[in-house]
Image (tube, grey):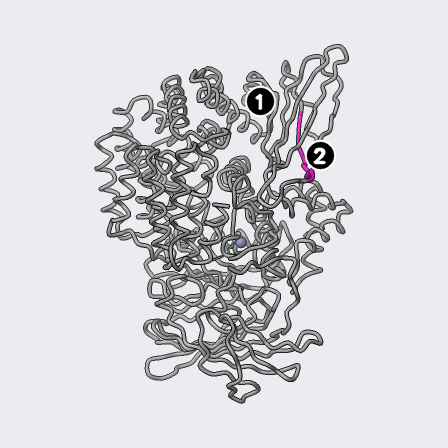
């Protein structure tokens, strides 16, 4: 397959200042007539080339005259034009209901909707489908009135009418220039939760969240989140919404989380619908975060967009940073940061250390759909966060103001973003820009030494950026490191300092320490690195109890746990004493937020423990982790029971305090279950039955699903019967079983793939079972390879139906180099079997071939 390279970028040959689209909509057959005003860009003689995928032109007209001398070249429509300005009309026919790839125009649950990012518009009409071609869109839709009473598109609704024969039409105009990837339409039988927002300049914006009528009550939280986001973007970034209307539509079949189409966001329904009975606290948080993310794109992505897809992190990294900051401001900033870092370590670090590693601005790709990665999004956000740290909040804001002012209405590059930050702040970011070009997670070694005679502490920082595919040698990165030194006798520190390391190594000295100080470093995870220090167990225990930076405190506890687990795995001898003591102190610290405690006392995941090992041994990890869990459970049983009792008995409320209470109580339930399986199962089953909210019900179900308790079967059955008609909740039922720590999970998952409610056509359902199973280190890596074989079968089956979703699964197998020789062979065999499948999509081909290289 063809490789697209960043260095080959060339401005478009033809611009399209205006486009009129006429849709005659139907699920089986939709006719699309497009009218493009085109103008030659520069003094070249090249033809007009319009991208097309799965399209056949039924008519082509140039300046009103039908022509026949067009040609199709690899799906593209090529037209020779003599002048510099023309009007091109094309007609095509689509079948939305046969579009299972969910890119372009497709049918979902009785709706017709579009997904155009990154390259879906070319599946709707012939067009120079690239983000640097900005056009003014006018759209007319005609459809059956009873099946599709609501017709929505970008911008403002300017006219409506009756088309006769039970059909009606609507026209929408978007006054803002936009790239084709931001085009959207939706037709369906939808009802709106309507509200309004008054902007900082006093304009009224009509807000609508469109869903099935029965789901309208589940949109209240999303609406509140939208209004809070609009206000936050005004307050924190000075960004005001620009249209008179902002609509959101929820659809059930969606390849991603949501899409920021101008004035018409389309969402995966799992990020819109929430009520106490069906959504967990995590779901509520996700709704808030994704609503904010898509709304923030209106400026960081839409008003200022990307010149080409290599610049994807320009909009995604910045917008993730913005949504993370927003979420931190809505609740516990400490817990938000812990979750952000967990997500980074859980998905981006493995990507950075594996065969699919790429910089946040990649140099080449085969299929851009494969580059919506944790690196582009989450590492991209960390890179923006580091700019924020280096500049400080005020200068960062000045940089963002300059960026939006300078580039409003343009399609730009990551260089333009950094230049605005640099110009507004006066801070030189030239070395920092290596973050955009170099892949790999830097390792930072921090060694603290002390001289009792001089009362000096010496800190030596050394960085190493590992080789990654295609990048054998790296230059040092700019690492903004927040640090503090604590006096271990008084518990005081002289305050935090920012050290900027942009060389391989540096040594810093600190005076006035009669005793060796305790090093608190990379506070708030100020640089996305893997940290190695020479801190002792006593140092970590001190920080876990005393550090005034909550993230550093959490990290110290995690590091204590990791040290204990890794030592147990490598020596076979487990010494749990330090962790038991640290957890006990944390549980008894009345000054701590329960939400924070809930995170601090949870053991690192199997996968994260594996990341610390040269060769991942899933069985040894599981054994060591269960042993530590059991030790913590037994040592603090009375405390877990006390916490469980103290945090229950209240009726559901969605507030940071109530959420924190549920979290710590459910963590306690897990430990009680570990200490006493019978009592724990009874407690869990009672909670399962009595819960007035999904967080508690699902936590109880998950605890039972991991257990040998007989009540487990009953609970799963009750849950299924209660929620079988709610697709989003049924997804949880599949996932709970797919991530179970039970030994028979592989068989259970294989059986569930044959369940009548399992389907390849709904990405949420596929991810709920197969995607979740791919993350279950214990069962996916079952030594006999049944997990791998099942997984490969599923990817092969899904590929012709939905190549994008199938390709997203490949990285679970792509990590084969991290395992023992037997597992390596089995994983490679699974990948090779996928690669040998006839007619493989380029999406899956790219992921698998790179994974095997
Ligand atoms: N910008 C959006 C990306 C997206 C997408 C990408 C590929 C295929 C389908 C997709 N749906 C949405 C989402 C976002 O980052 O906000
Ligand atoms: Zn985004």
Instruction: Identify the residue under disc 2.
Output: 501
Q: Is residue 762 magenta?
A: no
- Which residue is situated farthest in the top direction here? 453
Helix, strand or loop at label 2? It is strand
- Measuring 56% from the left and 31% from the top, which residue is drawn there? 551
| Residue 814 sits above or below residue 588 on the image | below
| Residue 119 sits above or below residue 529 on the image | below
- Find the magenta span and give its range: 475-484
Q: Please tell me the numbered disc located at residue 819.
A: none
Mark 1 vs mark 2, CA separation in Å? 23 Å
Instruction: Identify the residue under disc 1.
Output: 543
- Which residue is situated farthest in the bottom direction here? 65
Circle 2 packing at 10 Å, graded few (<14), some (14-19), many (20+), is some
Picture coordinates of residue 183, whole percent (x, y): 51, 67
Helix, strand or loop at label 1? It is helix
Picture coordinates of residue 203, whole percent (x, y): 59, 64
Picture coordinates of residue 620, whole percent (x, y): 40, 25
* In this picture, residue 84 sits left or right of residue 641: right
């Amino acid at each position: 397959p063809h490789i697209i390279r960043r260095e080959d970028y060339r401005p478009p040959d033809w611009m399209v200042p205006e486009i009129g689209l006429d849709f005659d909509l139907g699920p089986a057959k939709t006719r699309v007539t497009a009218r493009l005003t085109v103008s030659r860009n520069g003094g070249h003689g090249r033809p007009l080339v319009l991208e097309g995928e799965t399209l056949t032109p039924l008519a082509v007209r140039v300046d009103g005259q039908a022509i026949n001398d067009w040609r199709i070249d690899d799906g593209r429509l090529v037209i020779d034009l003599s002048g510099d300005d023309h009007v091109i009309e094309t007609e095509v026919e689509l079948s939305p209901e046969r579009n299972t790839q969910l890119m372009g125009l497709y049918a979902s649950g009785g709706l017709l909707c579009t997904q155009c990012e990154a390259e879906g518009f070319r599946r709707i009409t012939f067009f120079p489908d690239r983000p640097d071609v900005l056009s003014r869109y006018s759209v007319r839709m005609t459809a059956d009135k009873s099946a599709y009473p609501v017709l929505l598109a970008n911008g403002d609704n300017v006219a409506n009418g009756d088309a006769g024969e039970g059909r009606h039409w609507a026209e929408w105009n978007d006054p803002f220039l936009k790239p084709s990837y931001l085009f959207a339409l939706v037709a369906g039988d939808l009802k709106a939760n309507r509200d309004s927002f008054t902007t900082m300049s006093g304009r009224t914006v009509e807000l609508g969240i469109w869903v099935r009528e029965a789901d309208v009550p589940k949109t209240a939280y999303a609406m509140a989140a939208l209004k809070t986001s609009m206000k936050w973007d005004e307050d924190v970034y000075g960004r005001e919404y620009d249209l008179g209307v902002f609509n959101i539509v929820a659809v059930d079949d969606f390849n991603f989380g949501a899409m920021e189409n101008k004035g018409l966001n389309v969402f995966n329904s799992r990020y819109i619908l929430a009520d106490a009975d069906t959504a967990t606290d995590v779901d509520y948080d996700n709704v808030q975060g994704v609503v904010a993310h898509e709304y923030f794109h209106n400026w960081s992505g839409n008003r200022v967009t990307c010149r080409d897809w290599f610049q994807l992190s320009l909009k995604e990294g910045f917008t993730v940073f913005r949504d993370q900051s927003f979420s931190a401001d809505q609740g516990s900033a400490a817990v938000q940061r812990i979750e952000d870092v967990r997500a980074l370590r859980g998905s981006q670090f493995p990507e950075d250390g594996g065969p699919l590693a790429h910089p946040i601005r990649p140099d080449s790709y085969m299929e851009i759909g494969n580059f919506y990665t944790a690196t582009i999004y989450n590492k991209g956000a960390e890179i923006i966060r580091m700019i924020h740290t280096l500049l400080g909040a005020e200068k960062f804001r000045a940089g963002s103001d300059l960026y939006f002012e300078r580039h409003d209405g343009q399609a730009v590059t990551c260089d333009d973003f950094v230049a605005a930050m640099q110009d507004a702040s006066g801070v030189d970011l030239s070395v920092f820009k290596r973050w955009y070009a170099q892949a790999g997670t830097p390792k930072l070694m921090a060694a603290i030494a002390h001289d009792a005679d001089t009362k000096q502490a010496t800190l030596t920082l050394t960085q190493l950026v590992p080789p990654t595919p295609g990048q054998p040698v790296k230059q040092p990165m700019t690492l903004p490191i927040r640090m503090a030194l604590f006096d271990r006798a008084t518990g005081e520190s002289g305050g935090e300092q920012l050290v900027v390391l942009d060389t391989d190594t540096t040594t810093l000295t600190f005076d006035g320490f009669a005793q060796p100080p305790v090093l608190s470093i990379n506070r708030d995870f100020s640089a996305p690195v893997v940290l190695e220090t020479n801190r002792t167990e006593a140092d970590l225990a001190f920080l876990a109890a005393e550090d005034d930076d909550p993230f550093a405190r959490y990290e110290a506890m995690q590091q204590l746990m990791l040290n204990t687990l890794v030592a147990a795995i490598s020596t076979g001898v487990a010494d749990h004493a330090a962790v038991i003591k640290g957890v006990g102190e944390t549980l008894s610290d009345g000054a701590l937020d329960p939400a924070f405690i809930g995170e601090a006392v949870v053991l690192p995941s199997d996968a994260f423990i594996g990341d610390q090992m040269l060769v991942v041994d899933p069985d040894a990890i599981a054994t060591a982790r269960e042993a530590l869990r059991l030790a913590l459970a037994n040592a603090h049983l009375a405390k877990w029971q006390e916490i469980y009792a103290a945090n229950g008995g209240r009726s559901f409320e969605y507030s940071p305090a109530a959420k924190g209470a549920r979290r710590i109580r459910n963590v306690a339930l897990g430990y009680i279950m570990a200490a006493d399986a019978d009592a724990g199962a009874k407690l869990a089953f009672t909670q399962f039955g009595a819960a007035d909210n999904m967080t508690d019900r699902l936590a109880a179900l998950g605890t039972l699903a991991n257990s040998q308790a007989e009540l487990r079967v009953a609970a799963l059955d009750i849950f299924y019967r209660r929620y079988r008609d709610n697709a989003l909740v049924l997804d949880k039922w599949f996932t709970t079983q797919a991530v179970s720590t039970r030994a028979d999970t592989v068989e259970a998952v294989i059986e569930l793939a044959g369940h009548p409610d399992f389907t390849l056509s709904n990405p949420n359902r596929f991810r709920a079972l197969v995607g979740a199973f791919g993350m279950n280190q214990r069962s996916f890596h079952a030594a006999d390879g049944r997990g791998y074989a099942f997984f490969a079968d599923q990817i092969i089956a899904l590929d012709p139906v939905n190549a994008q979703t199938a390709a997203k699964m490949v990285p679970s197998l792509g990590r084969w180099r991290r395992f023992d020789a037997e597992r390596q062979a089995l994983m490679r065999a699974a990948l090779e079997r996928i690669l040998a499948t006839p007619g493989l999509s380029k999406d899956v081909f790219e992921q698998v071939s790179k994974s095997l290289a």
